[in-house]
Amino acid sequence: MIEPGLQIVTADAADRVDITVNMGPQHPSTHGVFRMLLHVDGERITAVEPFIGYLHRGSEKLCEVETYRQIIPLFDRLDYLSAFNNELCFVLAVEKLLGLRVPERAAYTRIILCELNRIASHFMFFGAFGIDAGAMTPFMFGFRERERIQQVFESVSGARMMHNYFRPGGLNLDVPDDFVDNVRSLLPVLKRGLEDAHNLLTGNEIFLARTKGIGVISAQDAIDWSLSGPMLRASGVALDVRRDEPYSLYERFDFSIPVGDEGDCYDRYLVRMAEIEQSIRIVEQAIADFPGGPFLGAVPKLIRPPAGECYVRTENPRGELGVYLVSTGERRPYRVKVRGPSFVNLSAIQQLLVGSYLADAVLILGSIDIVLGEVDR
Amino acid sequence: MTVRLTTVAPSPFRPAAEVALLLRERLGVEAAVVIDEAVFFVPPDDVGTTARRLRDDPALAFDYLRCLSAVDYVDYIEVVYHLLSLSQRQKAVMKVRLVEPDLTVDSVVGVWRGADWHEREAADLFGVAFRGHPNPRRLLLPDEFEGFPLRKSYPLAPLPSEDVGEEEQ
């Protein structure tokens, strides 16, 4: 029964109908509070209007009224799935302005924690991406592995997520005595978890049909949109800050950069899976010759970098995290600009979704792997 | 598998002093070396043309915009462009100073599309106007918000007093 007043759209007219579909901000598959308006013609997306800012907390403004050590917890809360990587970028910027040297033990600890954080973040992606593709089990598997890593983080910093552990010049505390043993016994678990993950999704026919050739972005476009991390590498550009401009002590470690060919959702997935393997390799090398010595260098009690500025970038699980730090020689920074990888990668959704099916929108958004804490800051 | 592993170590980035010479030669700008980057200033009206030359000149080939920031120095607002050339392996920083009341600068979205949200953010939080931006809507703040919160004149209540923030350790 057709309600009175309801317009019956004939096939001819439907060809010309532009329908707007609202998605978010409270949509379970927008990975947080993100909203977009999708203009569709039939099943095809013709234009995308993204809306962000629902989680904007003014982190950059807060940085201007906090002292340097007080800012570290703020960075935890940007990309909360890779908090160690965020802290690292900020403390490196402060160290660069101060000209501080970091003891080897601290640098190694940072690398181990950051790489474990990358693995945890990628397992989280694996789970969430599985759900986006319509599979529930990957989420359970991804979280199982991630939880084991969180336990190590907790034993080191006391917190599962907001660690507040790195300091300019080193670390807040030394690692516990059983740290190396804990990490050593964790690695086989992660390897088995990665194998499980591959068995579950990588060759799965439904998964392949959903992800191959979907959401393609060419290398040229990826560079133009300033994409970074797995988003850029899946399109065939081998840019990885860890190798291009080694920071901390990354130049000492032997690892490869996984690069995709197609630039589609599947390649982005594969690149992240391959990165887990490489991160495990780095952690293996780091615990094999884990150095002794102090965990904190000679740091002034009051951190007051000389007037100046620097831009420091590190390779986060999601791409290039940049901190543009301007100091006027005060106890607080004059300006902190955070170039979040999710922020920049997400902006390309305006192009990524156009031309694809509405049903793939969730999947393509999932393949960007955003964290809205860092998009909105 | 469509993923390959690369192990080749890339060539290091060109030293900032060399980039500064190159910039003088190709663009006629005076670039200063700040820590490890070559930093140069351009007048607000030249941003669009300079950006295009930075990208299209094969010796410069700055095809990747790393970051675009605005900084409020009270007397003027500085817009900072962090650039990278993937093919020429070099970095540079372009700066432009804007003085009130004319806080207008060319949009570079036509040159580097990655500038899109950075520019909208700077417009939203600093009140910088980007001439020719294809979609100059607000980005982070609600539509009815008044003022530019990242300006120094916009206080974050309560103002920091000297005894706030006792250093730990």
Image (cartoon, coloured by chain):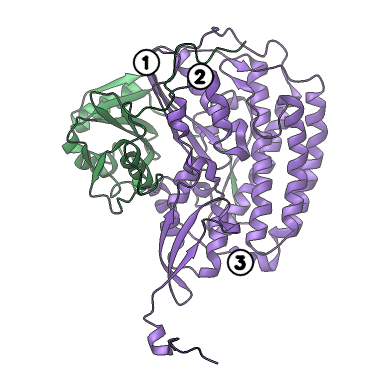
Label 3 crowd (10 A; few <14 / some 14-19 / many >=20): some
> Which residue carries the number 2 mark?
A68
Place of residue A289 in the rendered image (x, y in percent of width and height, measured from the top left) = 73, 21
Callout in the foreground (1, 3): 1
Tell me whether circle 2 and circle 1 mark residues in contact (CB < 8 Å): no
Distance from disc 2 to disc 3, alpha carbons, whole Å, reads 46 Å
Place of residue B87 in the rendered image (x, y in percent of width and height, measured from the top left) = 38, 40
Residue B6 seen in the figure:
yes
> Which residue carries the number 3 mark?
A210
Distance from disc 2 to disc 1, alpha carbons, whole Å, reads 13 Å
> Which residue carries the number 1 mark?
A328
Chain B colour in the picture: green
Quarter occupied by residue A11: bottom left
**Which chain is represented by purple in the image?**
A
Q: How many marks?
A: 3
Residue A238 seen in the figure:
no
Q: Are marks 2 and 3 on the same chain?
A: yes
Chain at numbered mark 1? A
Question: Mark 3 is on which residue type?
Answer: Arg
Asked whether, in this view, residue B79 is left or right of residue A375, the answer is left
At x 59%, y 58%, the residue is: A29
| Depth order, front residue of B167/B43 | B167
- Which label is found at residue A181? none
- Dot 2 lies on which element? helix
Question: Mark 1 is on which residue type?
Answer: Thr
